[in-house]
Amino acid sequence: MLDAKVTPFIKPLLKPLIKALDSKGVTPNQVTLAGFVIGVLALPFIILNWWNMALACIILNRVFDGIDGQLARYQQSSSSAGGFLRYLLRFSILRFYSFGVLALLTLKSGAYLQWCC
């Protein structure tokens, strides 16, 4: 995927941020949850057809997804529970995006009346 090609370029840029987050006591799970919230914000932007805002949220979500893993390795705090949380939220985000596109297409076609009636 694209992440594997971009990560080697981004990793050195994230090092100062990882150190700063560590010094503030931020945990990898907090970064994961913040990234999830940012990713969920893309849903209304997709439905409203605000593609630039949706793309910004999606990109930020991916950046946070990279930061949480780097932070866990830096703090030597990787865990199965943290990995499961990361996987669960990443899977949920993909479903939210699918739902957003489906809702947008449905609203554009006028079929939304069938959902409520």
Image: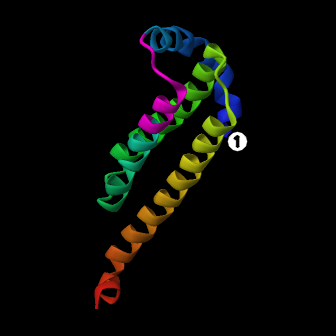
Q: Quadrant of residue 102?
A: bottom left
Q: Position of residue 64 (x, y in %)?
A: 50, 31
Towards the viewer: 92 or 83 = 83
Vertical placement of residue 96 versus 65, above or below:
below
For the C terminus, which image quadrant?
Answer: bottom left
Towards the viewer: 71 or 108 = 71
Secondary structure mostly seen in magenta is: helix
Q: Residue at x 54, y 27 (%)?
A: 28
Q: Position of residue 47 (x, y in %)?
A: 34, 62
Residue 106 magenta-highlighted: no
Q: Position of residue 67 (x, y in %)?
A: 55, 25
Q: Position of residue 70 (x, y in %)?
A: 62, 21
Q: Residue at x 46, y 9 (%)?
A: 20
User: In the displayed structure, does residue 48 sit left or right of residue 83?
Assistant: left
Q: Quadrant of residue 73?
A: top right
Magenta stretch in the rendered image = 24-34
Q: Residue at x 55, y 34 (%)?
A: 65
Tag 1 residue = 1
Badge 1: few (under 14), some or many (20 or more) residues near its Cα, within 10 Å? few
For the N terminus, which image quadrant?
Answer: top right
Q: Residue at x 62, y 18 (%)?
A: 11
User: In the displayed structure, does residue 115 sit left or right of residue 22?
Assistant: left
